Amino acid sequence: MSDEIENTVDAPDQSNDQEQKKPVLIEKGEISEFMKTALVAVAIALLIRSVLFEPFHIPSGSMKPTLLVGDYLFVNKPAYGYSRYSFPFGIAPIEQRIWPKEPARGDVIVFALPTNTGIDYIKRVIALPGETVRVKRGRLFINDMLVEREMVQEIMLEKLSGATVPAIEYIETLPGGVKHSIYEESDIAQLDETDLFTVPEGHYFVMGDNRDNSQDSRVSDRVGPVPFENIVGRADFLFFSTNGYAGLLELWKWPWSIRYDRISMDIDPMRVATATENGK
């Protein structure tokens, strides 16, 4: 109807209306200013992501119970300095790590998979360069010393398929008094019996907290020891978490899909001072 009304207006009047509206539509130079502003905003976002903090999404359950599918966290890039893999697609022409700082035992790190650097993994640092690691009958040994674990509770562990299996939650205490939770379905699973590994210099031995459902340094042809160069950064805290109940456009379901109690959750393990650290 409105189109028909406009078509009945005399031609001279249309011309006058258009001339009056031209300045309102776009002022000269507005597009270029908008583009400049957009480019600056994109550049700042890329700078923050490349140099300071990069968001990371948890797609699998290999780090349960610490990290759940649907968790979103920030990776601290400066924590260990910078390598080529600290930047998107590993394109930075960096041969050696800049401002290096060694990861601590128990840190949760994001790293470029040694066998396919186009894929990022997230695991926990278990052993440091020069140390030995072995799993025997489901028990972890570091430098031939048994790593203590304390049973917390029996649980039903949900798999990615949706099926549930019985499992046990333990508190594991790594050398140096680093405490964190792990899940074990049993002590006779495929990766519960390994050879003796010696961590090469400049590398780190990593494992998932969901011990029977993690591809980690125990799998030599997939992960193996992680080179220091491949480490992207340290996982510090969660900024969002969803249980996957709501689809992206199902806004009415979002209030029941968000895991509010996990937002801003710290990922660092508990570190208890030992007698050796206190000089006793």
Image (spheres, rainbow, N blue to C red):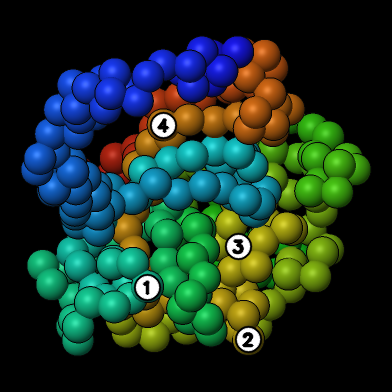
Q: Nearer the viewer, mark 4 or mark 3?
A: 4
The structure residue drawn at horizontal position 28% and vertical position 23%, both measured from the top left corner, is 12
Label 2 to label 3, Cα distance in Å? Answer: 20 Å
Element type where label 4 sits in the image = strand
Q: Nearer the viewer, mark 1 or mark 4?
A: 1
Q: Which residue is mark 1?
A: 89
Q: Earlier in the sequence, mark 1 or mark 2?
A: 1
Label 3 to label 1, Cα distance in Å? Answer: 34 Å
Element type where label 3 sits in the image = strand
Q: Which residue is mark 3?
A: 140
Instruction: Name the mark on residue 252.
Output: none
The image position of residue 204, as x and y in percent, is 40, 72
Instruction: Name the mark on residue 221.
Output: 2
**Relative to 122, residue 5 above or below:** above
Instruction: Verify CB contact (< 8 Å) between mark 1 and mark 4.
Output: no
Instruction: Name the mark on residue 239.
Output: 4
Label 3 environment density (alpha carbons within 10 Å; few <14, some 14–19, many ≥20):
many
Amino acid type of the residue that numbered disc 2 sits on in the rendered structure: Asp
